[in-house]
Every structure is written in structure tokens, then in C-alpha cells.
Image (cartoon, rainbow, N blue to C red):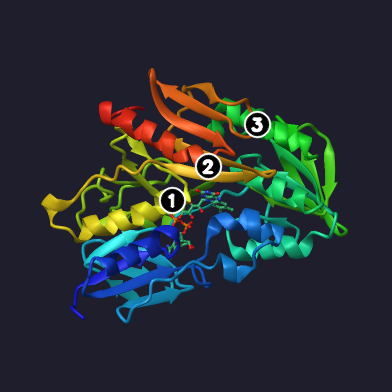
Amino acid sequence: MSTERLVVVGGSAAGASAVQAALSEGFPGRIDVISRDRSAPYYRPGLSKQFLGGAWGGQRLAQRVPQAETVFWHSGAGATELDLQRGVVRLDTGDPVPFDHLVLAGGCRPRRLHGLPLGDRAFEVHRIEDVVGIRAALPQGGHALVVGAGLIGSEVASTLRAGGSRVTMVDPATAPLLPALGPLGNEACLRWHRANGVSLLLGVGVSALSRHRDGIVAELTSRDTLAADIVVVCVGVRPDTEWLDGSGVPLLDDGGIDCDARLLVRGSDVVAAAGDAASWVSPRTGGNVRVEHWLTAVEQGAAAVRNLLAAPDRRTDFGGLPMFWTEQHGHLVHGLGHHRPGSTWSVVEGEVGEPGMVAGASTQGRISGYLLVDAARRLGHYRQQLLAASDSSPTVV
Ligand SMILES: Cc1cc2nc3c(=O)[nH]c(=O)nc-3n(C[C@H](O)[C@H](O)[C@H](O)COP(=O)(O)OP(=O)(O)OC[C@H]3O[C@@H](n4cnc5c(N)ncnc54)[C@H](O)[C@@H]3O)c2cc1C
């Protein structure tokens, strides 16, 4: 083993992929993976779907861990300090971990509602332990209050309904899925919720929660109160980057790590970022973009490490086309490419909310993204359309 050292902070989608890529590239040195999770890496998207619904156990959720005698996993260890000058990451145990190359792949963590502490009846959905807690606390046919009707809240509502629970979902927004799915996807998903018996309270927030006998009572901004067995808080995530404050790694207002088009942290050629926390200059949009999707995290982990280990003139821009999927009430929805709040949407195939629907988003007159409902077989076709569109116009915003 050479004395060269690669350190990866975060051992999930982006981190594990970075380790795998370093091994595939023949990195000869030592690789340290610092992962706050005590459990081995797992497939996070399954948490709100198959694992919550009971279709998969923990083993099925487990991710393949890149193994080699040069790879050292520090599981259950948090990185708390970065000394860029000396090339050292310090752990919460106080131990220093020196590096020549560093990949920051710490992802995001859930936002919490101010004044609403989690507990034995209040949960978020980010780690295996959260979902184990929900499953244990919600009685068969019980009532769950889901706060936040974005993608993850909607998946939780859909999975719990399919399992026979009563579900009430509240969100202060009246079109909560607009940012993720655009107006047609939002309309479709709200329709599926209603058709499947989710009680939707839109334009309403939760102002207080209290523990009450065997359940919780929520005070709503509408001044109503609502009793349920449990509450599941799904109000979005933010990059888990506070530990980098003051380290010299530039952070953007949303907490994202500011990277160039090659995923290298601005001002450094030994530190790169990948996954949910990385905000990089996408050649497709021409500006900083941060994507919170599994496939992008996997692709970026590999791309970041290849660029770190490559000679400067062999480094390449990361131009991966974003793709995500979500499962809602038996419908498999895919999103491809980019869309912005000002994008114009139109139906390209089928009818809104029906299997086979494809909707396209145009930004500044050019197609920039697609949404597909139960149309996975059409993904390749629309992917090609977007790649062709961006080849002829590299900066579609
Ligand atoms: C419930 C749920 C459902 C989802 N469903 C989908 C889906 O259907 N489709 C899709 O495309 N995406 C989905 N996602 C998003 C997807 O899981 C993420 O985009 C992906 O996990 C991001 O990977 P990552 O490696 O960047 O970060 P993460 O998976 O968040 O992993 C980061 C890891 O780094 C660790 N870490 C953070 N800071 C430190 C530190 N200082 N020291 C040590 N370790 C640290 C964290 O504990 C964590 O284990 C879902 C996410 C959730 C939570």
C-alpha cells in the first residue's frame, strides 16, 4: 500500500460510490470512510416505500459495501473539524484522520419544526431507526398525521394508507408538490391522495404538538386541533455541513458546498464534494445546482473521486442528467432533467394522472425536463430527447 491517503466523509450513496470508484481506478493508498451511521450503508429511498410498508426487511435494504484491505470504515464516527492547511479531518472521538485527497459526501439531514421535538410518538424519515420507530408506534389501522406533503411526506402517506392506516396530511402550501413535480405532477398526485382516502389539509400548518395519553394532539394554524397516534414530520432537508463552518470550505446560503463544474470545492484541488450536499456548476444549466436524488449522488461520488485522482488536464465536468423516481399510491413517477418555478409545462403523451402520461417542462423556450407516470419504458426515449436538446444548446436554465 502506498502512503497516499483518501478520506471520504459519509458512507452512503455518494460516499460508497466514491470508494468503489477509487478502487476501480486502482488507487494504491489507504481509504478511510467516516460514517456517522452505525449501521452499514443502506438504500435510503426504500425507507419510505418498501421498508415502511413491511415488504422489505433491513437485509434487503442493505447497500453493497466496497471492501478491500486498503479500505477502513469508521462507522458511528462523526467528522467534526476540518483543517485544510494540515490536511486533517478530526473525529468526534478526537482522533485525527490525515488526507491527501478528501471527498465530502455527508448528504442532507431533515429539517425540524421549531418547537416540535421528536419523541416516542413524533418521527422523521431519514434513518432505518426512524422507520422502525414508526412501525412499532403505529397500531394496526391507527391514525398517522403526516406534516409536509412534498415527495417524502406523500410517499409516507401513500405507504401507510396502503397498509390500512388512517392518514391525515397537512401542509401550509396549497400546491405542495409543485417544486418537485411541476403543476401537472402536483395535480396528479393530490388527486391520487384523495382517491385513496388520504385526508388532505392544504394551506394549513402545525403550530404545536403535545403528547396525549397514547397519542399526540396537534394544534393547527387553522385553530383546529387534531388527535392522532403518531406524527411523521417530512418538511424537507438541508445539507449536513455545519461542521465545515469556518474551515475554508465555501458554503452557499442553503448550506450546499460550493463546487466548480468538476465537483472540486472552490479554491481547492484536493477536496471534492458529491451527493445531496454538493452544489456544482452544471454544464446543463450554467449555474450552481444541488440535486437531492439517489442516482445523481451515486454518479457524483464516482466522478468526484476520478477528478481528484486525475492529472489536472484530465479532469472533466460533471454533466449527469438528473433522474429521480417516486412511488405514490401504486404509480411509479419518474422525473428527468431540470425544471424551475417559471418553467412552462404541457402534456406530451396521455392524460394528467393516468398511466402513460408524459409531461414536458420548457424553460426559456427550450425543453429542459420531463415527468413520466407509469411510463418507465419511455425513459430512454425522453432521456435521448434531453441529451439532444442540450447538445444543441448547452446552457438550458
Ligand atoms: C425517505 C427517503 C426517500 C427517498 N426516496 C428517493 C427516491 O425515491 N428517489 C431518489 O432519487 N431519491 C430519493 N431519496 C433521496 C436519496 O436517498 C438521496 O438523494 C441520497 O441518499 C443522497 O446520498 P448522499 O450520499 O449524498 O447522502 P446521504 O444518503 O444522506 O448520506 C450521507 C451520510 O453521511 C453521513 N454524515 C453526514 N455528515 C457526517 C459527518 N460530519 N461525519 C460522518 N458522517 C456524516 C450521514 O450520517 C449519512 O449516513 C430519498 C431520501 C429519503 C430520506
Of the two numbered discs 3 and 1 in the rendering, the one whose residue sits closer to the viewer: 3
In the image, the residue with mark 3 has its CB under 8 Å from the nearest atom of ligand 1: no
- Residue 277 is situated, as x and y percent measured from the top left of the image, at 41, 50
* Amino acid bearing label 1: Leu
In the image, the residue with mark 1 has its CB under 8 Å from the nearest atom of ligand 1: yes
* Tag 2 secondary structure: helix
Q: Quadrant of residue 14?
A: bottom left
Q: Quadrant of residue 258?
A: top left
**Mark 3, other Cα within 10 Å: few <14 / some 14–19 / many ≥20:** few
Residue at left 43%, top 51%? Answer: 295
**Relative side of 49 to 282, left or right:** right
CA gap between label 1 and label 2 equals: 15 Å
Q: Nearer the viewer, residue 103 or 44?
A: 44
- Residue 334 is situated, as x and y percent measured from the top left of the image, at 53, 40
Earlier residue among tags 2 and 3: 3
Residue at left 22%, top 58%? Answer: 308
Residue at left 49%, top 44%? Answer: 324
Q: Quadrant of the C terminus?
A: top left
* Amino acid bearing label 3: Glu
Label at residue 354: 3
**Relative side of 316 to 342, left or right:** left
* Tag 1 secondary structure: helix
Query: On the image, numbered disc 1 is attached to which residue?
Result: 295
- Residue 2 is situated, as x and y percent measured from the top left of the image, at 18, 78
**Mark 2, other Cα within 10 Å: few <14 / some 14–19 / many ≥20:** some
Query: On the image, numbered disc 2 is attached to which residue?
Result: 376
* Amino acid bearing label 2: Ala
